[in-house]
Image (cartoon, rainbow, N blue to C red):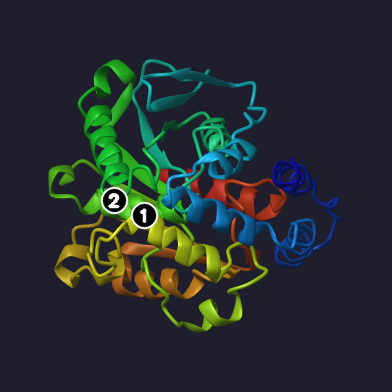
Amino acid sequence: MKFVHILLSATILASSSPALRAGESDDLIMKNEAAAFLSNMPENLQHIQSEAIIKAIGGNLSDLEAVRNSRNTPPPLPENVEVRQMTDRLRIYEPKTAGRKPLPALIYLHGGGWTFGSLNSCARFCGAVASGGNIKVIAVDYRLAPENPFPAGLNDCIESLKFVSSRCDSLGIDPDHIAIGGDSSGGNLAIATALAPECKGLLNALILFYPVTKAYTDGSDSWNRFGKGYGLDSEIMETFNRAYLAGESPRNPAVSVALCSDSDLERLPPTLLVAAGHDILRDQGIEFAERLGSRVRRIEFPEACHLFITVAGQEKAFEKAVGLTRQFLEN
């Protein structure tokens, strides 16, 4: 019971944030919100989650299921958004004001180290993007490791993109304006899906928030500086990699997308990449963006930390991320 209490306490505490003061800059607001967010996170939460994944790798899933359940509470959604389950794996968020004109679509892949996260954990972001009235968002409930290691989750994402693109007429989606996106490990899956040969020509945009691009310890400045106490510790990141890989080489470009050739990366559509300044994955994202050159719009929130998309508490970073997503997909 103590294990579950710690997990639930983290969820409850992270949902509160300090009031925004008039006149504060966005960076100062993000700094204050990130500090409050991290101070509310139990000190040993990441270790507890890592141990739960290790037990699951060994066949005991009970603690990992508690972690998953702690992040599976449906959030309140905007009143102007209609939500429906399309299939067992796909949930669509549609603006109620949408007419008959086909709209752009964003296929969204939640984060959670390939081992937890759900349709509910990314629902707040999906609903917020759809509430702008001009974009439909489809979230994917892909299979999770360690029960389903690479390439199971990736295959689900690829099949989901193919499914949506083949049904644009019935879904009211503009086939020339389909994007895929994700945060953290979801960003990794979004890149790998966009690079899959069977998805060639299906996408016109890629949306990435602090993506994993290397499924191994990268030894970068951000890895060393922010590897403990900033929302994603190096201990659990290494455990995520172990669970997802399950013996697969971390040098496989479908896993560590940073290892893709320049010619492969040239096939990616125009990309929005948003990094958090105080994040272990910051340098991975920056390096990846630099390789994309003029085809990427790179934004860094210098005072934000990991998790601002899927865990409430860093409201200014979340709000700006939603606005950037809408702007990028609507233009």
Give me the residue at 48% from left, 47% from top: 325
Instruction: Look at the numbered discs 2 and 1 and tell me whether their residues touch, using CB distance below 8 Å.
Output: yes
On screen, residue 137 versus residue 16, left or right, reads left
On screen, residue 40 versus residue 56, left or right, reads right
Give me the residue at 29% from left, 51% from top: 150
Give me the residue at 75% from left, 44% from top: 15
Quadrant position of residue 64: top right
Look at the image and tell me whether residue 233 can be seen: yes
On screen, residue 77 versus residue 32, left or right, reads left
Mark 1: secondary structure: helix
User: What is the distance, in whole Å, between disc 2 and disc 1 at their CAs?
Assistant: 6 Å
Q: Position of residue 315 (x, y in %)?
A: 70, 50
Q: Position of residue 6 (x, y in %)?
A: 74, 48
The residue labelled by disc 1 is 244
Local packing at callout 1 (Cα closer than 10 Å; few below 14, some 14-19, many 20+) is: many
The residue labelled by disc 2 is 150
On screen, residue 100 versus residue 128, left or right, reads left
* Three-letter code for the amino acid on which mark 2 is drawn: Phe
Give me the residue at 58% from left, 49% from top: 309
> In the rendered picture of this protein, how many numbered marks are placed on residues?
2
Mark 2: secondary structure: loop
Decide: is 165 above or below 122. Answer: above
